[in-house]
Amino acid sequence: MSAPSHADHALPVEPLLKVAGLAVSYGRIRAVDGVDLAVEPGRIVSLVGSNGAGKTTTLMALSGLLPLSAGHITFAGEDITTLAPDLRVARGIAHVPERRRVFAGMSVRENLMLGAYSRDDAVDIASDLERMVALFPRLGERMAQLAGTLSGGEQQMLAIARGLMSRPSLLIMDEPTMGLAPQMIDLILDTVLEIRKQGMTVLLVEQNAVEAMRLSDHVYIMRLGRIVHEDSGANIDPERVKSFYLGADA
Ligand code: ATP
């Protein structure tokens, strides 16, 4: 194969994640209804929208935690629509769930090791632990501490670090700043930028649309189970976003 030429940069980039016609139902309630998304590699893409819009449901379907009623998911060029969640992790998708679910009765180190469960490369795991400490020094100071005794912000750091321990190419984050103090929100959002800088792709759900717009390359707005608007982070109009939030279901 020949080396890439400068002209290659002009070619459209193949999305790392492509979602077509995604639908998810809870019994007779269709929570997500025909969602199309494309997440290009190395980008931060946000999904914003009011409560109950279907954002968490979408993320859970992407990581295989909820079955699809319809649609297709392609990741790194392969159809993963019916792939089991653990195999999606092995392919490079990590999910940092809503409400930072850490294992409260286990130490910080044990929580981190769980994130690496699909790997058997002990040396690299040790160096990844060091990378996590570099990213979150506060975790490094608390490796032996039980996760349940950490502050909310520290638990969020741990949830993110645990996700990163599987060496994902795509990190899915569900409301990482929810309920955190302003200073901690800034720290977590700076970390999202750092994660992109390290070459990963991020799909982020944020209740705080203004923050999401500020840091995202692309923003999708969701309402009542559908994508109602999308634009680049730089171009998206905050007033337009507000009008979607304050729509008929507000
Ligand atoms: P939030 O910001 O409040 O988490 P969201 O955009 O993430 O909102 P979802 O949590 O995906 O929205 O919910 C979408 C819809 O599905 C809502 O109407 C919600 O009530 C419904 N729903 C979510 N989880 C369940 C469930 N386990 N059983 C039944 N309905 C559910």
Image (cartoon, rainbow, N blue to C red):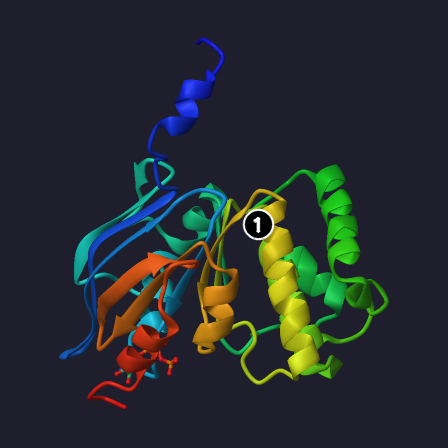
Residue at screen point 40% across, 44% down: 40
Classify residue 216 as left or right of residue 156. left
Q: In x, y percent, where is residue 188?
A: 64, 68
Q: Is mark 1 within 8 Å of ligand 1?
A: no
Q: In x, y percent, where is residue 81?
A: 27, 49
> Is residue 97 in view?
no
**Quadrant of residue 158 within the rendered picture:** bottom right
Q: In x, y percent, where is residue 31?
A: 22, 75
7 and 124: which one is in front?
A: 7
Callout 1 amino acid: Arg
What residue would you read off at disc 1? 196
Quadrant field for ligand 1: bottom left
On-image quarter of the N terminus: top left
On-image quarter of the C terminus: bottom left
Compared with 96, 30 (above or below) is below
> Is residue 44 in view?
yes
How packed mark 1 is, by other alpha carbons closer than 10 Å (few <14, some 14-19, many 20 or more), is some
Residue at screen point 23% across, 88% down: 249
Tag 1 secondary structure = helix
**Quadrant of residue 54 within the rendered picture:** bottom left
Q: In x, y percent, where is residue 212?
A: 48, 68
Classify residue 39 as left or right of residue 243. right
Compared with 145, 165 (above or below) is above
Count of numbered badges drawn on the protein: 1
Residue at screen point 83% across, 68% down: 144
Classify residue 120 as left or right of residue 40. right
128 and 2: which one is in front?
A: 2
Classify residue 143 as left or right of residue 65. right
Extreme-left residue of the structure: 28
Extreme-right residue of the structure: 141
